[in-house]
Image: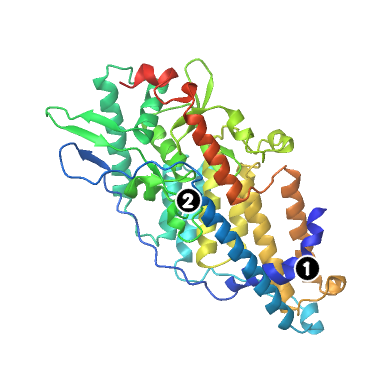
Amino acid sequence: MKHLVVFLFLLGLAFHQISGQYPNVPIVSTPKPATMQSNAVIQGTTVPQPNAYQPFGSSADAQNVRVISEIGKIRKQQLLVQQAHSRPVFNFEVCRSVIPLPDFGSESGAEYYRNAFGEISKMLTGEAPLSLKDAIFLSENAYLENKMSYKAYNNHISETVGLCREKIRQQSLNPDDDEVKMMMLFHYITDTFKLKLPGAEQMLVHYPIQYDFEDFYGRTDLCKRFITKVMDENSGQCHNMPEYCLILADAMGVNNAYLSRSPDHSFVKFQDNDSRWHNLELTCGAVINDQNYLNSGFIKAEALRNKLYLEPLTRQETVADVLVDLASGYVRKYGYDEFVLQCAETALKYYPACVRARMLRANSHTARALYVIERTGMPNPERLHLCPQAYKLHQIMLQSYQELDDTGYEEMPPEVYLDWLNRVNEEVKKPENQKKSIRLQQIIK
């Protein structure tokens, strides 16, 4: 088992990185709900022009990745030095006792998360209708301390769908054709969308949603990954843009659009009227094939056999995946406790191939093991068996790593991801992948 070699590293470095969440609540900026204002403007009014399109993987992005990587290396060295000079004293008496694990359920705002988990769980069990729109709202609203307006959220979706339907009507297209509806949504998200207002000479204009390169993983600001961020700022990344598209597709009654995954990435997989599959790459506005994702080099044969990537997810699987986002917000505010593990296990029950849920579960087991190991005085590996609770949690942690490895998962470094995005952007320039080609040119005028 390749993860056996990480034990000493985890006791030093990882403990310092994770244990800051125990028992104190980490300091986070006060989240604010997005206003979800309209991004469509009336042509002729004074409005700011959209940002110029930037190619993926620009030199500035690559430089930022390198700087962050170097800072990370320095920080690791500092932490290892600190650990060498401040190792706790092994306490045999404490080692033989049962150490209570952290529980943040009584913290202010934690009840929002448990309520959201309960509502999403009802969708998964069939007690409530499956709704990706509502599941995402529940997740984001919990992080924003129940300050979001469900009415404003719904209104934005209804108004956007109304614009697309009106464009379909004005172009005399079939309003019941799923392909027509999906391509119109794709046009709305990735192109400059113009619509003549009924009974007026004015033209409504919606600019394409821009890729937000700043903190696209949401490591500094988790709201960067929110649907409401797309609604409010007309910009997003590969996590929230596909989900936004699917919410709109559901509202339009599209039946053959699905979320799909590749390493550290998501996109919309769509089946046309001839039963052919297309990948709608919303981050760069292209229709690409599976080979473009395989070219990343981080999709192993085992991963494909285990259906980790490139599969169309059912709505139940997609809603289950939202539990990972719910837990991620909880961890950001409070830390790892039983609630986080509950979210991971529930997500895997309904979406067994969910890599993100497996990673969340492994992280949870790591946090639990390190929490107990530290309080026993951080015994040497050969003495860990003298601490029953620590030893058991450590074995569970290693097992979770092995289970993740067995799926064929391989971590993609940020700099490699940016390079892959850059190559995908090059694909857009090919004639066969132009937005105004193939099916789209037959629909959008």
- Mark whose residue sits in front, 1 or 2: 1
Query: Which residue ends up furthest to the front in the rendered image?
Result: 59
Q: Is residue 213 left or right of residue 188?
A: right
Query: Which residue ends up furthest to the left in the rendered image?
Result: 200
Q: Residue at x 42, y 43 (%)?
A: 54
Q: Residue at x 65, y 61 (%)?
A: 364
Q: Position of residue 258 (x, y in %)?
A: 51, 32
Q: Position of residue 443 (x, y in %)?
A: 35, 19
Label drawn at residue 8 = 1
Q: Position of residue 154 (x, y in %)?
A: 32, 44
Q: Quadrant of residue 67?
A: bottom right
Q: Position of residue 236 (x, y in %)?
A: 42, 46
The answer to whether any part of residue 70 appears in the image is yes
Label 2 sits on residue: 119
Which kind of residue does numbered mark 1 sit on?
Leu
Q: Is residue 126 above or below residue 224?
A: above
Q: Quadrant of residue 143?
A: bottom left
Which kind of residue does numbered mark 2 sit on?
Glu
Its colouring scheme is rainbow
Q: CA distance from mark 1 to mark 2?
A: 41 Å
| First-in-chain label (1 vs 2) | 1
Query: Which residue ends up furthest to the right in the rendered image?
Result: 382
